[in-house]
Image (spheres, rainbow, N blue to C red):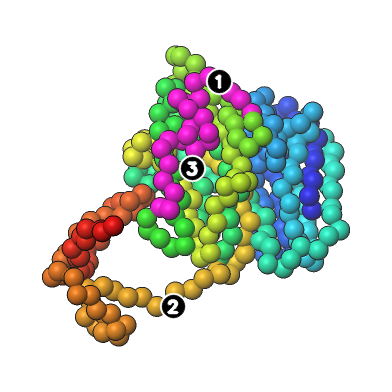
Amino acid sequence: MWNLALELEPSRDDPASSIWLVARWDDHAVADVEAPLPLFFGSARTDRPAAGLLFGLHEGRYVSRFPMPFWSAAEVRVENRGRGPVTLAHEIEVLRRAYPRASGYFTAIHRHEAPTTLGRDYGFAEVGGAGHLVGVSYAMRGSPIGTYLEGDERFHLDGAATPALHGTGTEDYFNGGWYFLFGRFSAPLHGAPYRLSPLGLTWGGTGAYRAHVGDLVSFVDGARFSIEHDRDDEDVHDDHESVTYLYRRPEPLAEWTDELDVGDPASEASHRYGATDASPTGLLDSVFEGDDDVTRVRDGDATFAARRGSR
């Protein structure tokens, strides 16, 4: 499946977020896609839509251009979880072309956390198996001065407790700057459809999206994608919601086969390891970076003298 286009008119009594997109591929027991319709298409606010290349609102139609491969069956539903009637028109384009079996299934993971958790990142998604991240649609609500934009994205890949990617700020991750100072915008692969923080109000809000096309984030044995909900995860009054887009397969593509623990005599002996310039074993006493910075690490290890290079 390639192109998905929807036109809808929600009831007066229910917000558009009460309409959900649900899809499953090849009779999977759990839905591969389950998300509120506006946020899936790039913006939680229907009056401030996104107009991206892969998803958005174009000429009154919600459009998704993510390839969604399947091999035996596909089920796509639009669910009205509100009370009033909804008028819906749809168009689905299917390409009759065989995808290689190694391709991953398109997955859209919805998360909503309100209030946020002290000392813990807001989690976009945590998955096993192998695949790659291809985008995030994100809605934030918090302080009117926008301190919820102080978060750094921290992406942990393949079981590592230290993040492989650690960013510098929420608006930086969405390719903006200075709290999206210059207002809302919608580019092909990133944007901020709305930035609402009028003076005198208790709450402000921002919506942003990013598609990873030339910079997809790959993993071979599970991944945890998260972001601080403000600087150091201190604010517990925020409201955060997201849809994360991935392609993935449930089985990992790598497995742990061996480990050499330098500083451990038994491990060194079993690997016939020896170093002539090692000083006596030292002690590492530290913490991980990122969301696991409360996990203390103590380990004995050998240290080595620096060597001056020669020309």
Residue 270, quarter of picture: bottom left
Q: Residue at x 48, y 27 (%)?
A: 177
x, y percentage for residue 22? 71, 50
N-terminal-most mark, 1 or 2: 1
What secondary structure is the stretch in magenta mostly built from? loop
N-terminal-most mark, 3 or 1: 3
Disc 1 or disc 2, which is closer to the eye?
2
Task: Residue 18: tell me if it is visible.
Answer: no
Q: Which residue is mark 3?
A: 113
Residue closest to the far top: 200
Bounds of the magenta segment: 163-186
Residue closest to the far left: 280
**Which circle marks residue 161 in the picture?**
none
Secondary structure under tag 2 reads loop
Task: Residue 224: tell me if it is visible.
Answer: yes
Q: Which residue is mark 1?
A: 183
N-terminal-most mark, 3 or 2: 3
Q: Residue at x 60, y 66 (%)?
A: 250
- Looking at the picture, tell me which residue is in the foreground, 145 or 211: 211
Residue type beneath disc 1: Gly
Disc 3 or disc 1, which is closer to the eye?
1
Give the alpha-carbon distance from disc 3 to disc 2, as whole Å.
38 Å
Give the alpha-carbon distance from disc 1 to disc 2, as whole Å.
51 Å
Left/right of residue 272 with respect to residue 279 in the rendered view: right
Residue type beneath disc 2: Thr
Secondary structure under tag 1 reads loop
Q: Which residue is mark 2?
A: 257
Residue 17, quarter of picture: top right
The answer to whether 206 is drawn above or below residue 228 in the figure is above
Q: Residue at x 67, y 29 (%)?
A: 49
